[in-house]
Amino acid sequence: MKKKQFKAESKKLLDLMINSIYTNKEIFLRELISNASDAIDKLYYRSLTDKKVKIDREDFQIEIAIDKDNKTLTISDNGCGMTEEELENNLGTIARSGSLDFKENLKKEDAINIIGQFGVGFYSAFMVSDTITVTSRSIDSKDAFTWESSGADGYSIEKSERDSVGTTITLKIKEDTEEEKYSEYLDTNNIERIVKKYSDYIRYPIKMEVEHVHTKDDKEEVHKEVETLNSMIPLWKKEKKEIKEEEYQNFYHEKFFDYEDAMKTIHTSVEGNVSYTALLYIPSHAPYDFYTKEYEKGLELYSNGVLIMEKCADLLPDYFSFVKGLVDSSDLSLNISREMLQHDRQLQLIAKNIEKKVKKELETMLEEKREDYEKFFKAFGMQLKFGIYNQFGIHKDVLQDLMIFYSSKREKMITFKEYIDDMLEGQDKIYYAAGESIDKINLLPQVEKVKEKGYEILYLTDYTDEFVIQTLMNYDGKEFMNVSSESLDLDTEEEKESIKKENESNKTLLTSMKDALKEKVTDVRFTNRLKNHPVCLTTEGPVSMEMEKIMSAMPTEEKIKANAIMEINDSHPIAKKLKSLYKENPEEVSKYAQILYAQARLIEGLTLDNPAEISSLIVDMMAK
């Protein structure tokens, strides 16, 4: 038997394959099954155009056989088979594809799904086997031929026997090593698992003899029967009108291991520049690891029902990483690599379409099923917010209309648009307040005056919320305004003039209080923005008191502080007390300043630097 040599470039590639540069070795079976499916496709297509070829599609099948004694795994099909020349061309040159040639030669109107690719995919079998033997008989020949290779040294082709048309591939499985347990590819349960994982939706039955152990009269009996391992028809390729909601949910439970039903199912098919079918789910709750580094986003990616990648991260933007599901496209090559996918234009088009589809479905849920959307937002709103302020806000226009916040006036969650639609005449700001909870925000002194003026306030209770607002800057031309900001302007001209005079006439008092507090505040002043409370803290600049609190809790040495201003209610009895005290006993004013500052911090939910000192000051004053 004369041995033939692979071409130099093929030999290098084969050597890499044999020495297994891939960690996911089990994909070899996916490749061989896909090739078998292609061979059957070709014969079926031939039968439609060639009257001499008479075949019943019901007879098509792929068979898998395991021989543990001889350590062989065999994959057989009754497809079109290969001539001696085709064996030479398809298997003698790596990366040459009989399937690909066939597909390219088809006219568009004769389009047929070809998913495998003899070449690199076929040679992946060398990752698990020492020798590959291919016996094939073509529909165009009475003779069969056997191709055999033990690796990079070369291959042989000789005439042989095969009773019927088709191809049989026999793998001599490698011996186990310390690193790899190759014998697992001779285990029926493992083979069944691999078929289910990668080839469950191949359109032809994949059959294998399976052992079942039964216990009878305390004795184990082994019963063997041939079973079909694959379901053949993917749920997502059925007509939507034929699928019940229960089927969608059962598929979701089985595929994505969720004990609860998905909140929303999105089943869509697109044809055009890129064709694909997507079956997507929006979960009803966040996985336990969703907001951790361990969580891995991505959709399952199929090429004509054959799994290419379990988690294709490039199909989802980070802010929609909660979406589960899959995409199946005939426009993607089965053998495409992860690196190629990142630059694949068709994949980018699919990803853009999916982003638009998910956004549209969320907007529909927001408009038509508010209760469901609020439940969704509670679980995944944080991720949407992260999408707004991440990457300097480049995605804010995509996500801003999906935001909802609690309204002080309506006492429920509302959108920015709903806020604007109900603004008072002449109102040009969207007012918000930040705090740990709705109840605590309600207690803020700064909130009282804004409510009294009749303005609606959005309550921000997540630590990310203020970052979102600052990234957006405005909505529909309306600027956001923190009710705790020093620049809040709700006073009439008369009120402004009155408080200005009050601060000017008490300048030395206020300066002494600021000096007593040192760097803790940038200013101390009287205000008419408070109603019943004696004191509050407002801020200058982008960092609010709530943001200071959040940043101070972060595990970093750099502590960012807000530019705080202590404002004292001019109509409160404490203002009168301070003025008289400064005239009679100015030294005592510094103690009042520290107590009032401590009170203002506590109202804001902030900690005190020295609570013991404040406690002593209060006790000392009470004792007088």
Image (tube, rainbow, N blue to C red):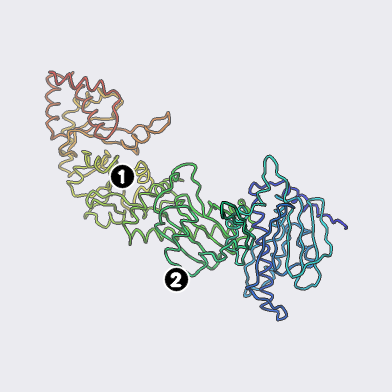
Tell me where residue 154 appears, x and y as whole percent. Answer: 82, 53
* Residue to which mark 1 is pinned: 460
Q: Quadrant of residue 506?
A: top left
Binning the other alpha carbons within 10 Å of mark 1 as few (below 14), some (14 to 19) or many (20 upward) gives: many
Q: CA–CA distance between discs 2 and 1? A: 42 Å
Q: Nearer the viewer, residue 308 or 558?
A: 308
Indicate which disc, 2 or 1, sits on the residue closer to the N terminus: 2
**Residue at position x 31%, y 37% in the image:** 546
* Residue to which mark 2 is pinned: 241
Tell me where residue 15 appears, x and y as whole percent. Answer: 76, 48
The answer to whether residue 191 is visible is: yes
Name the quadrant of the N terminus. Answer: bottom right
Placement of 32 over or under 466, stated as above or below: below
Q: Is residue 372 left or right of residue 268?
A: left
Q: Is residue 66 left or right of residue 193?
A: right
Q: Nearer the viewer, mark 2 or mark 1?
A: 2
Q: Amino acid at mark 2?
A: Lys
Tell me where residue 54 appears, x and y as whole percent. Answer: 69, 78
Q: Nearer the viewer, residue 132 or 558?
A: 132
The answer to whether residue 344 is visible is: no
**Residue at position x 76%, y 67% in the image:** 82
Q: Nearer the viewer, residue 571 or 243?
A: 243
Placement of 336 over or under 507, stated as above or below: below
Q: Secondary structure at mark 2?
A: helix
User: Which disc is residue 564 wearing?
Assistant: none
Q: How many discs appear?
A: 2
Tell me where residue 519 appears, x and y as whole percent. Answer: 31, 25
Q: Is residue 54 left or right of residue 216?
A: right
For this orientation, the residue located farthest to the front is 217
Binning the other alpha carbons within 10 Å of mark 2 as few (below 14), some (14 to 19) or many (20 upward) gives: few
Q: Secondary structure at mark 1?
A: strand
